[in-house]
Image: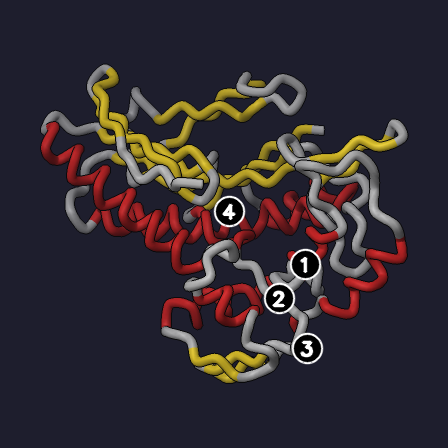
């Protein structure tokens, strides 16, 4: 299937809106600038960076560093400094979450494809995959990573938020104009156009696709959302969300439909939103302890 690498720029009031697709998500850049040439430059820089990160870390590309690691058959792979930083962050998330945030748990998609499944998997299949999960089994001596045979890693759980922060940083290196970066609902902005004109962002209604249940105002910082509104399975009257417990191989019990967290940057917001989802019924208590702004939809 051909990959869409086109961009679109349009005027929206006093701002410009740039759009493209990356990381299986609609992406847009809101730019409060009057100069069309500057807006076009912002858009091209943003799209190029998003596509670069997607190509480098996609598990679907044979030439990506993730595919190289997953196909290493137990041999040590030397990684570059950017990948090393992402792996360090993933290991930090693993430790902080008590092993619940685990980039090696993506192999459970073999049991839970969600998009084309009509019933829950067998316990036998799940049990066959559980021994292939656990970052404690990985040898990481910067810059060398040794992944046991048959294990896999997937950086998709942190890649999009990282791309948002990286992209905004690059754009701010060009101009300090008011800019908002939105990659599939993960958002970061430099500042709002003015104090009376904040960025307005809708949180999708989990029970009505493409409709906003709540409207948020953002003047600076970032928002990230984790949820089960798009990927889930209903079998025998029970709804299974796609956020999985790496210890059991089953969806987290009592997880909200959606959690949105506001933080200084998108990477941290995404980390806390995912941690909260993994807490299930305890999501709100966890977020209260973090003393952050959040919105939970059940």
Q: Is residue 17 left or right of residue 265?
A: left
Q: Closer to the observer: label 4 or label 1?
A: 1
Residue holding disc 2: 152
Total number of numbered labels? 4
Q: Is residue 187 left or right of residue 297?
A: left
Circle on res. 137:
3
Q: Are marks 1 and 3 in contact (CB under 8 Å)?
A: no
Whether tag 1 and tag 2 are in contact, CB under 8 A, the answer is yes
The residue tagged with tag 4: helix, strand or loop? Answer: helix
Image height of 130 relative to 257, above or below: below
The alpha-carbon separation of the residues under discs 4 and 1 comes to 25 Å
- 29 horizontally vs 37: left or right: right
Which residue position holds label 1? 107
Quadrant for the N terminus in the image: top left
- Measured in 3D between alpha carbons, the distance from the residue under mark 3 to the one under mark 2, in whole angstroms, is 11 Å
Residue for badge 4: 269
Q: CA distance from mark 3 to mark 4?
A: 27 Å
Against 295, residue 126 (above or below) is below
Q: CA distance from mark 2 to mark 4?
A: 25 Å
Precedes in sequence: disc 1 or disc 2: 1
């Amino acid at each position: 299937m051909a990959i869409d690498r086109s961009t679109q720029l349009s005027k929206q009031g006093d701002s410009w809106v740039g759009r493209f697709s990356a990381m299986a998500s609609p992406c847009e850049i809101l730019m409060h600038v009057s100069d069309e040439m500057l807006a076009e430059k912002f858009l091209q820089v943003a799209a190029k960076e998003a596509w670069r990160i997607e190509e480098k870390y996609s598990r679907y590309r044979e030439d990506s560093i993730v595919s190289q690691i997953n196909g290493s058959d137990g041999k040590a792979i030397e990684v570059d400094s950017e990948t090393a930083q992402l792996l360090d962050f993933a290991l930090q998330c693993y430790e902080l979450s008590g092993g619940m945030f685990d980039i090696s748990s993506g192999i459970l998609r073999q049991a839970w494809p969600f998009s084309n499944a009509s019933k829950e998997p067998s316990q036998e299949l799940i049990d066959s995959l559980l021994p292939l999960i656990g970052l404690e089994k990985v040898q990481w001596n910067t810059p060398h990573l040794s992944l046991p045979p048959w294990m896999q890693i997937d950086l998709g759980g942190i890649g999009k938020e990282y791309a948002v922060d990286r992209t905004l940083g690059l754009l701010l290196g060009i101009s300090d104009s008011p800019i908002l970066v939105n990659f599939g609902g993960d958002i970061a902005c430099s500042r709002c156009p003015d104090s009376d004109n904040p960025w307005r962002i809708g949180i999708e209604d989990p029970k009505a696709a493409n409709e906003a249940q709540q409207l948020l105002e953002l003047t600076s910082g970032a928002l990230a959302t984790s949820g089960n509104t798009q990927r889930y399975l209903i079998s025998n009257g029970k709804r299974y969300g796609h956020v999985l417990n790496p210890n059991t191989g089953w969806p987290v019990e009592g997880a909200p439909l959606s959690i949105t967290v506001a933080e200084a940057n998108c990477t941290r917001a995404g980390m806390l939103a995912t941690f909260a989802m993994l807490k299930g019924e305890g999501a709100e208590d966890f977020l209260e302890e973090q003393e952050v702004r959040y919105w939970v939809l059940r």
